[in-house]
Structure formats: C-alpha cells, structure tokens
Amino acid sequence: MASFFLKTISLANLLVVLSCSASLLSHDEECSALFEFKQTMFYQDYDYGLHKLDSWRILIKTNTSENGSGSDCCLWDGVECSNEWHVIGLDVGKSSLSGVINSSSTLFKLVHLQMLNLSMNFFESQIPSEIAWLKQLRSLDLSYSLFNGQIPNEISYLIQLSTLDLSGNPLKLQSHGLEYLLQNMTRLEILRLSGVELSSSVPCFLANFSSLSSIELIDCQLQDEFPSAMFHLPKLKHLLLRDNSNLTGSLPEFHNNSLLQYLDVSSTGFTGIISESIGNLNHLEALALDKCHFSGPIPGSLLNLTQLTYLTISKNEFTGLVPSFASLSKLTVLVLGYNSFDIGREYNWINKLSKLRTLYLDHMNIQDEILPYLANLTKLNAVSMRRNFIFGCIPTSFLNLTQLTAIDLQGNQLQGQISRSFLNFKSLEYLAVAYNNFSGTVGIESFTGLKKLEYLTLDGNKLSFITTNNYTNDTQQELRYLGLSSCNLKEFPAFLQLQTKMEYLLLNDNEIEGLIPNWVWNNSLKTLRMLALTDNFISGFHEHPHFLPWISLEVFDMSYNQLQGQLLIPPETIVIYVVSNNNFTGDIPPSICELKSLQELEGAVKASTGFNLTCDRFERRRGAVKVPVGFNLE
Ligand SMILES: *[C@@H]1O[C@H](CO)[C@@H](O)[C@H](O)[C@H]1NC(C)=O
Ligand SMILES: *[C@@H]1O[C@H](CO)[C@@H](O)[C@H](O)[C@H]1NC(C)=O
Ligand SMILES: *[C@@H]1O[C@H](CO)[C@@H](O)[C@H](O)[C@H]1NC(C)=O
Ligand SMILES: *[C@@H]1O[C@H](CO)[C@@H](O)[C@H](O)[C@H]1NC(C)=O
Ligand SMILES: *[C@@H]1O[C@H](CO)[C@@H](O)[C@H](O)[C@H]1NC(C)=O
Ligand SMILES: *[C@@H]1O[C@H](CO)[C@@H](O)[C@H](O)[C@H]1NC(C)=O
Ligand SMILES: *[C@@H]1O[C@H](CO)[C@@H](O)[C@H](O)[C@H]1NC(C)=O
Ligand SMILES: *[C@@H]1O[C@H](CO)[C@@H](O)[C@H](O)[C@H]1NC(C)=O
Ligand SMILES: *[C@@H]1O[C@H](CO)[C@@H](O)[C@H](O)[C@H]1NC(C)=O
Ligand SMILES: *[C@@H]1O[C@H](CO)[C@@H](O)[C@H](O)[C@H]1NC(C)=O
Ligand SMILES: *[C@@H]1O[C@H](CO)[C@@H](O)[C@H](O)[C@H]1NC(C)=O
Ligand SMILES: *[C@@H]1O[C@H](CO)[C@@H](O)[C@H](O)[C@H]1NC(C)=O
C-alpha cells in the first residue's frame, strides 16, 4: 500500500513538472513533435486505410508567414489547432499505421490535446503511462489498434474525458478494477471497453454519471451484479453487456422517459421476468436477451415497441403462448427459439413482417403450416425452424424466396417431393431438411448449380438418394457437411469423388455393401472430422490398412457392419471411436489407449483371444454418435 501511495505522489509531481515544461512548447515545437511521431511510424499495409500522415511535411522555412505558422502542421490531415495555435486534436484513425508508441513518444508532448484518435491501426504497443500527461483530453479513442498489456492506472487521471474507447484491444485491467479507473471521470458520455479483459464488477457510482449515453462492455469478463440503477441513467441510449457469463442482474421497472435504443444483455447471467414496463421504452430499436435465464411470459407491452428492428430472446426459459408480433413491422431480425413456449397454432402474423432478414423459430412447439406465411418475406436471408411440428408440403410461394442463403427445417413433419425444388436457390449455402416425411427420389443433380452449398442434410426421410454416375464436375459445390443417413443408398455416391473438403459425412443406416472404394478412403484426408457409417453391410477395405487415413478425424462410427480382420488405429485427434458389432479379430492394439483426446471407445472384439487391455477411462457403452454442431445456424 505504501509503495502505491509513493507512486501516486511521484507521478503527481512528475505531471506538474512535465506539464509546466511541456506547455512551453511553441507551435513550431508542437509541429516538430508531430513530425517526430511520424518518423517512428510506418504503414502496415498501403492498400488499406487513409494514410493521413502523407500530408505531414516540414517545409523549408524560407517563407514563414507573418503569424509564424511556417511549416504549418495545423494544415496537416487529422491535425486540429486551437485559436492559440496549439495542437488540440489528432485524428489518425484507420491510417494503417504501425510502429512503437512508447514512453518516449513525442505524442505525449502535445499536452493541449483534447482529442486523440489512434483507432484501427497496428501499433502492437503497450499504452504508456505518459498518456496521463494529456490532461486536457476529452476524447481518447485507441480502439482496434492492437494495444496490449495492462491498462495503465494513470489513465484514471484523465478526468476530463467524455469519451473513452479502448475496445477491441488485447488489454487487461490492472488489479484495481473499473472502480479505480473510472471513479473521477464524472463527465463520461461514451464508455467503450468491449473485448478488454476487465475481470471486474461494474461500479455502482456509474449510475451517478449522468452524462453517460453509451456503455459498451461486451465480452469483458465482468463479474457480480450489474447495478440496476444504471438502467435509469437519464441520457442512456446504448447499453451493450453481451458475452459476460459471470455478470448477473435483472431488468428493472422501466420509466417512460427512457431514451434507450439498444439493449443487449445476451449471454450473461441475467435472470427474472420481463416487466410490462418494458413497453415504456418507446425508442427501443434493438433488444437482445438471448442465452440468459429469463423466464415467465413475453409481456404484451413488448408489442407496443414499434421501433424495434432487432429482437432476440432465444435460449431462455420463457413460457406461455408466443404472441402475434404483427405490430413490429420494422423487424429485420426475429430470434425466439429454444424456450418453453406452449404449443402454438397461429403463426399467420409472420406475413406482416415483410422486412425480416433473419427468422429463427427453432424448438418452440409450432404446430402450424407456417411456410405459406413466408411468401411475403422477400428480404428473408436465413430461416430456421428446426424441431417443431410444422406440417404440409413446401409451397411454391416458398420456393420463390430464392434469395435465401440458409434454410433449416429439420425435425418437422413436412412431406412431399423435393427432387428439383431448390434448383433456383442460387445463393443457398445451408440446406437442412433432415428428419421430416419427404419422399420420392433425390440426387446430387437436384442441387446442380448451387455452387455455394456447403451444408446439406437429407437424413431420416423417406427419400431415395439416386447414385448415378451422372454428375459433372463443373457444377459441383464444395460440400463441408453431408447427411444422407437412411436414404436407401446401395453404394457410396460417386459424386463424393469430387468432394475434397468434407468435414462431416453421415451415411448411417443405408444398405451400402462390399468393400469401401479407395476413393472414399483417400477423400478429404486433411479436413474430415466425422465419418459415420453405422448400420450398413460394409465388409472391408481394398487394401489392409492398419491406420485410418484422416489426420483430423474426431468421430468415427462404423458399428453394425461386417468388417473383418485387425482393428484400425485412429489418428490422435479421435474423440469418439465406435466399431462394435463387426467381425474384427485379434487384440485391441494397446496404442489406442494412448490416444489423449479419446473420450469414448466402443470396440467389442468378438473373436479376440489374447484380450489384454485396460483402458479403464472409457465408458464402454453404445453411445449414439452426437452430431457436432459445427456449421450451425444458432
Ligand atoms: C521507443 O521507441 C523508439 C523506436 O520507435 C526507440 O528508438 C526508443 O529507444 C524507445 N524508447 C524507450 C524508452 O523504449
Ligand atoms: C512565399 O509565399 C508566397 C505566398 O504563399 C509565395 O507567392 C512565394 O512564392 C513564396 N516565396 C518563396 C521564396 O517560397
Ligand atoms: C496564419 O497562416 C495560415 C497559413 O498560412 C493561414 O491559413 C491563416 O489564415 C493565418 N492566420 C492569420 C491570423 O493570419
Ligand atoms: C479521484 O479524486 C479524488 C478526490 O479528488 C482523489 O483523492 C483520488 O486520488 C482521485 N483518484 C484517482 C484515481 O485519480
Ligand atoms: C466465471 O467465474 C468462474 C468462477 O469464479 C471462473 O472460473 C470463470 O473463469 C469465470 N468466467 C469468465 C468468463 O469470467
Ligand atoms: C400499448 O400502448 C397503448 C397506447 O400507448 C396503450 O394504451 C396500451 O395499454 C399499450 N399496451 C400494452 C399491452 O401495454
Ligand atoms: C402479403 O402482405 C400483404 C400486405 O401486408 C397481405 O395483404 C397479404 O395477405 C400477404 N400475403 C401473404 C401470402 O401472406
Ligand atoms: C413467384 O414469383 C413470381 C414472380 O415474382 C410471381 O409472379 C408468382 O406469383 C410467385 N408465385 C407464388 C406461388 O407466389
Ligand atoms: C443423365 O443426364 C442426362 C442429361 O442431363 C439426362 O438426360 C439423363 O436422364 C440422366 N440420367 C440419369 C440416370 O439420371
Ligand atoms: C473435371 O473435368 C475435367 C474434364 O471433364 C477434368 O479434366 C478435371 O480433372 C475434372 N476435375 C476434377 C476435380 O475431377
Ligand atoms: C463373422 O464371421 C463369421 C465367421 O467367419 C461368420 O460366420 C459370420 O457370419 C460373420 N458375421 C458377420 C456379421 O459378418
Ligand atoms: C498383459 O500385459 C501386461 C503388460 O504388458 C503383461 O505383463 C501381461 O503378461 C499381459 N497378460 C496377458 C494375459 O497377456
């Protein structure tokens, strides 16, 4: 403690000394200081940014103008001077600058600076404590410039600040926490520290900083309870607290004089119900409450917030009926899924939301046809309604929404043929229609020309996937995820030969028989993470390999086939390895036990004689293979 005080005192003295001497800098000396700063800088990438420093040139002084401005830095790009010819503003944001800013940087001689913007550059420096010499600063923006290390305590001396933006830098806050840093910055209007590792609670006194209008503390490792009084800050417009899982709190009773426009507490520990008083937030444009622990019904007053363009409340414990959101006609994003809503049969209000771009209604007990109501939503870009009870066919009006890039309807009761349905969706990247009642035949030519398609699941319908050799490689997409389980396959689809970047391949529960072709064995060697071939009639491999060839493989399930011979050794990346119910013989190679990532091993070895294996750490059970949610809409 003693040393801390000493440090404070000596720094205070230092500040007096330096600001006295520094304030004696003449205008020309300030220009020189700027020029010296320029000389320590270089451009990281000349193709990017504004290169403001190009205009910073010292002229040869044969022609000093009468007011002494000589080589006048006041005319340089990004430099602002006062009437007394002091440099008071420096804006070199987004200038692609790189270089070291250390304690001897001449920037810190510019003690009249009121505004300093170094944002969006590439400094890769620490923030020198000399920043505190710039006592006049009202606006300090160091965001997204690769500043690292600790935030110097001395920043707390900048008590004139109305804007403090350190966001997007790999910075940490010293042990004193936010309380120390901000305690005297009573004039703050804009506080942005998103992405900075604060590991701090939010100090209650901020509720008294009545000028605050924007608070952005996304992903800051905030802790403890958020002071509820802060919601009532009279000028508050933006409150963004997303991604602070250890921050608790609840929404207050809102007053009708609130100016709040953006409220985002998603992925925090916020709990409780949403009071009807939320209807008082007349200016609210974005409300993000997803991935918290909110409960209770959606208050009817929410439907009065007609300015809303963005509403996300998924992954909470909301209950009751989903109301009609028809009044919120400005919505572009609506995300409601994964709550505990009652069964809902009335979703025709969706046709009123013609500005929607994103609509996620997963797992929320929808028992309606719903797809016909999307006909009007011509701006819709992504729709996900997985795991509901949606029925009917895919209407032709839906097939008109060819601007869609992502469609997830898996786990519903849709029926009918889909053979050529999606051919016009030229932008489609993600199509998941698995686990419905679709029927008829489908083949890779059903997706010809969808060059952006990366994710396709057709599993678990009544479809027959036709494996002709009738594919052409000029129209082939590069799939990353393909699910064709229960698709009546008799052989490996030949078009897989052209797929070299697969990550997930699911062909369970088909009738594939015989040997695995070499081209499957040598496919996507670097990228494949999951291969599932359970419940087929596969009898072996063309050669007799000892190792599985995929170097990134995490999940391998080939149970319930007719494989023979020696067990194959998976790569070190393997997590789940299931080969039971085959006809393997011999010992389990002990090296399997040494695979560090392996969590689940199931390899019942029937004819094994010298069984000598103690891999006790594995549960020997038939685990249903969990489909990783790699490329997922949520
Ligand atoms: C500060 O950085 C400059 C290079 O930009 C270097 O020449 C100087 O020695 C450094 N000063 C200190 C105190 O590290
Ligand atoms: C001095 O400045 C004036 C006006 O800007 C200009 O016309 C003149 O050529 C300059 N003289 C020299 C020597 O640069
Ligand atoms: C001082 O010189 C600058 C640059 O030559 C000029 O723009 C400005 O008008 C001058 N100011 C006065 C007060 O003469
Ligand atoms: C804040 O101000 C108080 C009262 O002026 C002072 O005692 C304290 O040292 C200041 N704290 C910081 C961090 O500047
Ligand atoms: C949350 O708190 C727990 C327990 O104190 C800690 O282990 C964890 O790292 C914290 N997580 C974050 C994101 O701060
Ligand atoms: C919606 O606003 C109207 C007019 O301001 C008001 O009369 C009504 O009670 C509000 N509805 C709800 C559910 O709050
Ligand atoms: C499309 O929107 C218009 C106007 O909002 C509405 O009258 C019409 O019924 C909608 N069409 C469908 C198919 O929902
Ligand atoms: C599909 O779009 C076309 C042209 O935009 C339109 O004429 C047709 O009526 C639409 N079909 C359906 C079923 O909505
Ligand atoms: C193969 O492609 C040709 C031309 O696209 C088509 O006429 C033919 O029906 C296709 N054959 C099969 C078996 O799909
Ligand atoms: C695609 O087809 C052309 C000619 O039809 C062939 O030369 C080329 O190797 C094929 N590409 C792949 C990846 O099979
Ligand atoms: C396993 O091998 C035995 C003996 O070779 C054979 O009788 C049996 O049918 C095989 N079982 C399977 C499932 O292939
Ligand atoms: C099992 O392995 C251990 C260690 O490798 C060895 O000492 C032991 O003899 C083996 N037992 C049998 C039955 O092979």
Image (cartoon, helix red, strand yellow):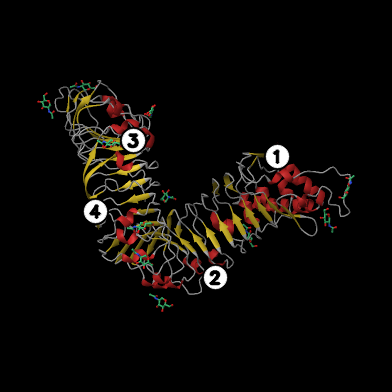
Q: Secondary structure at mark 4?
A: strand
User: Where, by quadrant of the figure, is residue 552 drawn?
Assistant: top left
Q: Nearer the viewer, residue 628 or 507?
A: 507
Mark 2 surroundings within 10 Å by alpha-carbon count, few (fewer than 14), some (14 through 19), many (20 or more)? some
Q: How many marks?
A: 4
Beta carbon of the mark 1 residue lies under 8 A of ligand 1: yes
Horizontal and vertical percent for residue 617? 26, 35
- Residue 485 vs 517, above or below: the answer is below
Q: Which mark is residue 414?
A: 4
| Mark 4 or 1, nearer chain start | 1
| Mark 2 or 3, nearer chain start | 2
Q: Nearer the viewer, residue 557 or 520?
A: 520
* Residue for badge 2: 234
User: Where, by quadrant of the figure, is residue 304 drawn?
Assistant: bottom left
Horizontal and vertical percent for residue 71? 82, 47
Q: Amino acid at mark 3?
A: Arg
Q: Secondary structure at mark 3?
A: loop
| Mark 4 or 2, nearer chain start | 2
| Mark 3 or 4, nearer chain start | 4
Q: Which residue is painted at 29% across and 44% down in the image?
A: 457
